[in-house]
Image: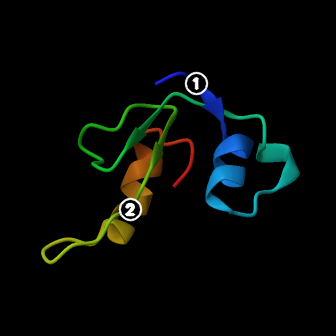
Amino acid sequence: MDAIDLGTLADLVGAELAPELRGRALTGVSTDTRSLRPGEVFFALSGERFDGATLVEAAFARGARAV
């Protein structure tokens, strides 16, 4: 994935973002904290046997740039 900035992602998904965060580069996307690499954005998905929202702190601890 080519790097995009957090502001561009926020615009694409219709999210509000503090102006000082808009230029932060994102290097990838992850839905699994076990394979998340620093600089990626973590999408917290939910399913029948898991709830990604419970992994937000773990995602930031592993270096997620945004959740």
**Labels 2, 1: front one:** 1
- Badge 1 local density, few (<14 within 10 Å), some, or many (20+)? few
Q: Amino acid at mark 2?
A: Ala
Task: State the residue at coordinates (56%, 49%).
Answer: 66
Most distant residue in the top direction = 2
| Mark sitting earlier along the chain (2/1) | 1
The residue labelled by disc 1 is 3
Instruction: Point out residue 40 in the picture as x, y percentages from the top left corner.
Output: 48, 36
Instruction: Point out residue 58 in the picture as x, y percentages from the top left corner.
Output: 37, 54
Task: State the residue at coordinates (13%, 74%).
Answer: 49
Most distant residue in the right direction = 19
Disc 2 to disc 1, how far (Cα)? 20 Å
Residue 67 is tagged as none
Q: Of 29 and 59, which appears nearest the observer? A: 29
How is colour applied across the structure in the image? Answer: rainbow
Q: Of 5 and 65, which appears nearest the observer? A: 5
Q: Is residue 53 above or below residue 36?
A: below
Q: Secondary structure at mark 2?
A: loop
The residue labelled by disc 2 is 44
Most distant residue in the front direction = 12
Q: Is residue 49 above or below residue 12?
A: below
Q: Amino acid at mark 1?
A: Ala
Task: State the residue at coordinates (68%, 63%).
Answer: 15
- Badge 2 local density, few (<14 within 10 Å), some, or many (20+)? some
Instruction: Point out residue 61 in the picture as x, y percentages from the top left corner.
Output: 43, 46
Most distant residue in the left direction = 49
User: Is 32 on the left or on the right of 13, as rendered?
Assistant: left
Task: State the residue at coordinates (21%, 73%).
Answer: 47
